[in-house]
Image (cartoon, rainbow, N blue to C red):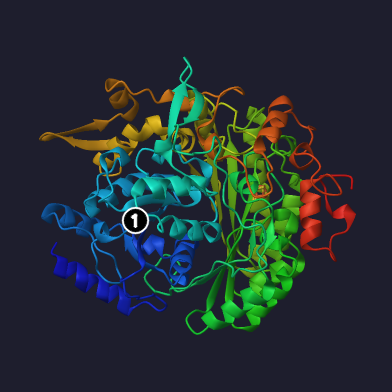
Amino acid sequence: MKFRHQKELAQEILSREVGYVRKPHANRLRVALIFPNTYFVAMSNLGFQTMYRLFNDQPDIVCERAFLPPKQELAALRDSGTRIVTLESQTPLADFDVIAFSVSFEWDYTNVLTMLRLAGVPVRAADRNYTHPLIVIGGAVTFVNPEPLALFADVIAAGEGEALVPALLDAFGTSSRSEQLKRLAQARGYYIPSFYDVEYNADGTIAAFVPREGTGAPPIVKKAALKTTDAVDPPSTTIFTPDTEFGSRFLVEVVRGCANLCRFCWAGYNYLPVRAFPTQRILDLAQAARQYSSRAGLVSIALCDHPDIEHILRSLKDMGYSISPASLRLDDLTPTIVSLLKESGERSLTIAPETGTDRLRRVINKTITNEEILNAAELIFSSGIESLKLYYMIGLPTEEDADLVAIRDLTVQLHDIMLKHARARGRIGRIVASVNPLVPKPGTAYQWLPMTASDEIERRMKRMRNLVAGIDNVYFNIKSERHSYYQALLSLGDRRIAPAIELAEANGGQWQGRRRCGPRRRLLHLPRSLEGRGVAVEHHRRRHEGSVLPHRVRQGNARGVDAAAEARQGKRAPAAGALTGHQAIGPIGPSGCYRHDSRRRLRASQLATADCASCSA
Ligand code: SF4
């Protein structure tokens, strides 16, 4: 593909967009912001859109976007050796001061490498020098575990964008690359992997991250997070285009975090404290966006924790929006909220029972019961909503065969409720249930839990498939064991898995399947290929309380609530009836229960003490 073609394609895309920014480059820090997936996926990503706005809000920064080209274009660029350019000014990426990646999905790690190659920049940080742009990698995945990307990044940004951008600009006030890195190493939320040596135990687990002398790197990098959302605009769609997954939907974050602290939930632990965005700012942004969009997507893991949620839903409906929530927490569904969603045109809702028994739900610190789930389903289907999406997990601590059977039974009961209301309406919806194995995510109460062995996961998945075969109008999406194997590798691995990412990238981004090998094609078996190169990958599944975890280098969050305390609790008392996570974390407010205090702070006028099922306050 020729440069001219890239330019024409970029102009075509820009002609369909509203809200992009063009600024002169002179005397500004030039940032190329990359989403390592296609334009179609990227422009529906609120984190990516927010970083674009935050960079360009700074008068001294000009930020332009670049994306992974679609397959044919990608092949044409590779074949012709043409360097990839940004969308706004069609400038080659290598001409920018900073290439900043916003990575939301672990599966996109291979695309990070592809984008660096298309930019003409060496993929490994050790092969780059001051003539290359500074490669900064951030996004949701670096909150979880930055280590798999450590050898590819000059800088890893761990935290919320609002709190990160000023420090980056400040670091570029210094002259040399090494001074820039040293200054960033002092800033909250910036991790410079090359400033640390890693020592390993004989069993392959990590013994220590040792900051190198003279770098000024701290032993623990703390995440950058906003203390309060009172003075900031909520993240929302700023560029509207019809060419995305969600069309020209207006996406807005309503409340950040969730105080429920389910033991497995990375988002719950990592976005504490729970912070609601100001109601009027949400509504002002929605009003301004109404001329470009008639659909509003509310992005929050605990939407109903916003103190004014009913007012927000009603106001959006009055503006003429149809409303889609990302997901809903069952214990927050009220008849008013369900009917507001139905009236605004929603036909399907998503809920997460996680498992089929109350006992196992208490183990994972999810306090809802089957009875409450069935009552919620009654409420949902009786309101006229037709379909339901469910999330379940398997491989949980203390899980028995009866728990798998219970997933089937609960789904069948939900299906019966759906049918009862569908008959009356004369139209049947459907239930889609996703079943995923538990990957004990870093930073959660289960961070030291070893991942269940692959053959056991395979056995339980097979059992699950047999249990649910042939239920009408219910579609089970049960992931393969290999899928969870690679998912765990990317979530739990450290910098030693870098060769695995390189190998998968060389295989066209495929983690398994056929790869070209000379004139013939053969099956890629990643663990075997890596062992052939002397790279062991199994260490990522091993955990013990004394071992240092790959992500420990950037532990800590805005409130200083450390998942480690809860992890010890979760490990000591995994059976039903153990202390709930909110109590185990320790007294951080008047009641001593994190959830209770968070909710009381958020909705002082509404929360009666009896509302909190997790404590006796
Ligand atoms: S309810 Fe539990 S699983 Fe859902 S967002 Fe909150 S902490 Fe996470």
Report the residue at 40% width, 33% height from top: 495
Image position, residue 578 (x, y; %): 78, 32
| Crowdedness near tag 1: few (<14), some (14–19) or many (≥20) residues, C-alpha within 10 Å | many
Q: Give the amino acid type for the residue marked by disc 1 in the picture.
A: Ile
Image position, residue 262 (x, y; %): 68, 43
Image position, residue 101 (x, y; %): 39, 54
Quadrant of the rendering where the N terminus is positioned = bottom left
Report the residue at 76% width, 31% height from top: 576
Observer-nearest of 70 and 603: 603
> Which quadrant would residue 286 be assigned to in this image?
bottom right
**Residue with the mark numbered 1:** 99
Residue at the top extreme?
202
Observer-nearest of 171 and 554: 171
> Which quadrant would residue 261 be assigned to in this image?
top right
Tell whether 294 sits left or right of 101: right
Image position, residue 130 (x, y; %): 28, 49
Observer-nearest of 248 and 395: 248
Report the residue at 23% width, 71% height from top: 9
Is the CB–ligand 1 distance for label 1 below 8 Å?
no
Report the residue at 83% width, 44% height from top: 592
Can residue 483 be seen in this snapshot? no
Can residue 231 be seen in this snapshot? yes
Observer-nearest of 558 and 280: 558
Whether residue 546 is situated above or below residue 518 in the rendered picture: above
> Which quadrant would residue 399 be assigned to in this image?
top right
Secondary element under disc 1, as helix, strand or loop, is: strand
Whether residue 528 is situated above or below residue 23 in the rendered picture: above
